[in-house]
Image: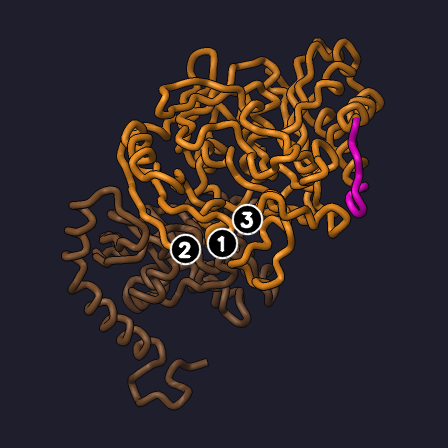
């Protein structure tokens, strides 16, 4: 489905509209970040309810933000930074829809405390393409029809890229084993495995 | 989820000090794949989290000398792919590779994994779950409330080590392999350092199923040590699941064999998926000592391993399954070369 569908004004997509709102919210919250940070540092150990200032590097850019320590990396990305590519499926680390990379390793962002990403590199599906050029794995998913509804796809692609980089895309059984943390209710597994095998076989840098 | 304070010290000593300073309700957190999950379900309710993952130098994997030593913060995925572990201790590598998903193995640490909590459906039925308002009694979650698993949907429950209070299965794979290899942990607490066999980390449920570990609340595991053994190369972790990957064990067996041609000098056997704690099967080990390993003697060892097993309503199949799992694991391990 084209994102412009659904009655949005020309040039304004649902995603940019949501992203804009989130960005405004973040800016307001950032204003009081320094004050809160100073309070936290002057009275250790922090008590329940104290907020926390962190500075993850998200898709190559520093993203200083003040959070409630309960915040998951997934909620930070989606609700505060406007990066809605990573999806909330089960929110318990069982489905893989929230897969992102932290310091180059794939993780379940729903079970990662955002606090742990202070100073670390986070890569999401939004950080995979180079400008308008799709990442080879994104293109392979299109070429092999590796999705239906698309909800699990960002997590599948982030896991797939990691699978190749780890050297675990050597053959179909190994791909299946190392992709078993990503569930697809539509059952697009055949296409997913084919896409990963294709990228790995072509020896393309991912 | 309830509110909590959060601290991320950069040394083990600072972590223990932070624990003491934080007071009641403090908990250590490493990868968080169990603790954070259970906090979302309102089962774990820490008032303060001491995040130990910024501690430096606690993730080293050492394979020289007469033991393997794994820093507690080494990720499961790193230990699972260590060359020495893969070649000389397949039981260790397989117990990690067959656990969870690569995402979770990248997050979870080999130290934290020892303290994974049960997947008993009644235990996980906390007030924060999707069926809030219909929580079942659970002595592990709410001491004294009763056990809904007994006489309930108990297909996944234990057949060994259970009590009238609790039948929840110890969920781990890695601890099963460690127990088979007589591994121990190095521990740091306010009172200093000590070491303890991995097997002694775990309590039977008895009347106090909410007390699962023997570690004091302020103590942290800093390393896991496995004494080297020539049985390591003839070892295997065999895990039977409802699906072929990314599932908890219905039954599993960690075995390591010291053989003289076809004859077993010494066998080490531990069971997972069927008991309330990692279960060393000493009767099965004794049954094999001095015997030729054949399909028949392997099957006899399997039967000996399940000595004393008591089924519930829906989990009787686990006894037969675990017996066969042990037998298969022994035959798989015996085929592995020691060269």
From mark 1 to mark 3, how far is it between C-alphas?
35 Å
Residue matched to label 2: B2
Residue A163 visible to the viewer: no
* Badge 3: chain ID: A
The magenta stretch is B308-317
The orange one among the chains is: B
Residue located at (30% from left, 73% from top): A19
Residue B118 colored magenta?
no
* Badge 1: chain ID: B
Identify the colour of chain A in the image. Answer: brown
Residue B311 colored magenta?
yes
Which picture quadrant has residue B99?
top right
Which percent across, then down, holds residue B206? 66, 32
Callouts 3 and 2 close, C-beta under 8 Å: no
Residue located at (33% from left, 55% from top): A123
Which picture quadrant has residue A35?
bottom left
**Residues behind callouts 3 and 2 on a single chain:** no
Residue matched to label 3: A175
Magenta segment main secondary structure: loop
From mark 2 to mark 1, how far is it between C-alphas?
8 Å
Earlier-in-chain disc, 2 versus 1: 2
């Amino acid at each position: 489905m084209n994102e412009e569908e659904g009655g949005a004004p020309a040039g304004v997509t649902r995603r940019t509209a949501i992203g804009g709102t989130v960005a405004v919210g973040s800016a307001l919250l950032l204003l009081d970040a320094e004050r809160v940070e100073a309070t936290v540092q002057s009275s250790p150990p922090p008590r329940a309810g104290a907020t926390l200032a962190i500075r993850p590097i998200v898709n190559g850019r520093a993203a200083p933000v003040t959070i409630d320590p309960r915040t998951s990396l997934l909620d930070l990305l989606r609700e505060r930074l406007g990066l809605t590519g990573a999806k909330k499926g089960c929110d318990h680390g069982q489905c893989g829809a929230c897969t992102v990379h932290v310091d180059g390793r794939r993780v379940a962002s729903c079970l990662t405390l955002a606090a742990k990403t202070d100073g670390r590199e986070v890569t999401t599906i939004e950080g995979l393409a180079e400008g308008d050029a799709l990442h080879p794995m994104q293109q392979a998913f299109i070429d092999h029809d590796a999705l239906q509804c698309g909800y699990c796809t960002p997590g599948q692609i982030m896991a797939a890229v990691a699978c190749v980089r780890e050297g675990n895309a050597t053959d179909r059984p190994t791909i299946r084993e190392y992709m078993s943390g990503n569930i697809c209710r539509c059952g697009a597994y055949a296409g997913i495995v084919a896409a990963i095998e294709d990228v790995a076989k072509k020896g393309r840098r991912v | 989820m309830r509110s909590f304070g959060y601290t991320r010290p950069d040394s083990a000593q600072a972590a223990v000090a932070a624990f003491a300073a934080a007071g009641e309700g403090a908990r250590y957190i490493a990868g968080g794949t169990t603790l954070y999950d259970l906090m979302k379900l309102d089962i774990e309710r820490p008032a303060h989290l001491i995040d130990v993952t910024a501690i430096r130098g606690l993730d080293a994997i050492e394979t020289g000398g007469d033991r393997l030593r794994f820093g507690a913060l080494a990720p499961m995925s790193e230990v699972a792919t260590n060359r020495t572990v893969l070649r000389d201790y397949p039981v260790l590598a397989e117990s990690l590779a067959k656990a969870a998903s690569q995402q979770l193995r990248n997050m979870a640490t080999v130290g934290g994994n020892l303290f994974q909590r049960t997947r008993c459906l009644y235990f996980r039925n906390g007030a924060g779950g999707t069926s809030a308002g219909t929580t079942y009694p659970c002595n592990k979650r709410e001491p004294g409330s009763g056990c809904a698993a007994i006489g309930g949907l108990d297909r996944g429950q234990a057949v060994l080590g259970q009590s009238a209070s609790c039948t929840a299965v110890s969920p781990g794979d890695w601890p099963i392999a460690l127990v088979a290899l007589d591994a121990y942990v190095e521990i740091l607490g306010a009172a200093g350092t000590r070491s303890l066999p991995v097997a002694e980390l775990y309590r039977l449920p008895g009347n106090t199923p909410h007390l699962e570990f023997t570690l004091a609340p302020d103590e942290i595991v800093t390393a896991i040590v496995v004494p080297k053994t020539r049985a390591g190369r003839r070892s295997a972790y065999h895990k039977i699941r409802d699906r072929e990957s990314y599932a908890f064990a219905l039954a599993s067996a960690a075995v390591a064999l010291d053989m003289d041609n076809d004859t077993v000098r010494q066998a080490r056997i531990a069971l997972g998926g069927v008991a309330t704690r990692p279960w060393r099967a000493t009767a099965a080990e004794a049954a094999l000592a001095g015997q030729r390993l054949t399909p028949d003697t392997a099957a006899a060892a399997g039967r000996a391993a399940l000595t004393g097993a008591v089924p519930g309503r829906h989990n009787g199949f686990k006894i037969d399954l675990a017996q066969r799992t042990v037998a298969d694991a022994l035959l798989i391990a015996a085929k592995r070369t020691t060269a």
